[in-house]
Amino acid sequence: MASSIRVRAVENGGVTSLKALVRHPMDSGFVKDSAGNVIPAHFIQLLTITHNGKDVFVANWGPAVSKDPFLECRFKGAKKGDKLTISWTDNKGESDSTTATIA
Amino acid sequence: MIDQRRRGFLKGVLGAGVASFALGSGMIPLRVEAATTPDASNWPKKAFNTPGVDETISELYGMDATESDKISMDLPTIAQNGAVVPVTVETTLPNVTGIALLVAKNPNALAASFDIPEGTMPFVSNRLKMAETTDVVAVVISDGKAYKATKNVKVTVGGCGG
């Protein structure tokens, strides 16, 4: 199965800039479907970005984050060719993880 | 006769090889997943279920935030689609350990909170949902104190830009 996470990380002048796009419905639990039934809340709660076994960014998300979440962050201490791991867990216990190489 | 035995032998070896390969390839992703799946047990559930900006900030960080002009927020003044409003926050405040994004008029104000470990820049860009025209509040934790900045977004669900 294709990963739900798309990542691009670029190092420039000691700062790594990371852009991630995650495919996820991010249902808030406030919206009804066409039959009038409430769509149960289904959203990513935690997304972590790890470099060399250390968290470089941790996002706690609520249901107000848009569908197919986009995230951009910047950190120091990584170089071109290094690996980053991006992982998420949602409120239903589903999870996904991917590894990206810094360009 | 010999041929048949050889074939049987080969089949056995191949079979074992395939089986161990399958086992090996099955094991590795399992182990990686177990090691990298983030543990959401520390997710601030109560803060995500609190309406109101000030109440949420004190629930999340246990203190009140003071206004700061050192937080810069980049978001549209008019959002044509409240379901996808890009919000970017950056600050020149020192020793930032956390950033949070709040939407004042959402049923629960907290949209996202970020941990900023040492070495990570106090910068984040995210896309948020907002039900109606409202204030967006960015909270920054710097030197253990909370600071905030506010910007209003006009949501035009009709998409006429007006």
Image: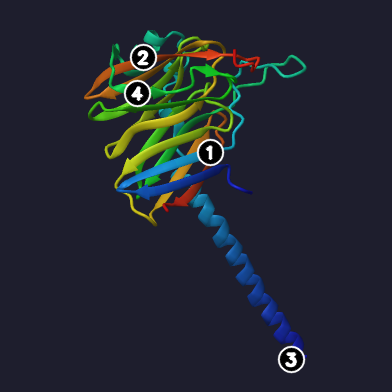
Residue A38: name its quadrant. top right
Which residue is labeled 2 in the image? B57
Callout 4: SS: strand
Q: Earlier in the sequence, mark 2 or mark 3?
A: 3
Which residue is labeled 4 in the image? B72
Of circles 2 and 3, the one toward us is 2
- Residue plotted at (39% across, 57% down): A81
Of circles 4 and 3, the one toward us is 4
Callout 3: SS: helix
Q: Which mark is residue B2?
A: 3
Up the image or down, A40 lies above or below A9; here it is: above
Identify the coloring.
rainbow
Q: Position of residue A52 (x, y in %)?
A: 35, 50
Q: Which mark is residue A21?
A: 1
| Chain of the residue on which disc 2 is drawn | B
Up the image or down, B27 lies above or below A56; here it is: below
- Assign the N terminus of chain B to one quadrant of the image: bottom right
| Chain of the residue on which disc 4 is drawn | B
The three-letter amino acid code for the residue at tag 2 is Ile
Q: Position of residue B34 (x, y in %)?
A: 48, 45
- Residue found farthest to the bottom: B2
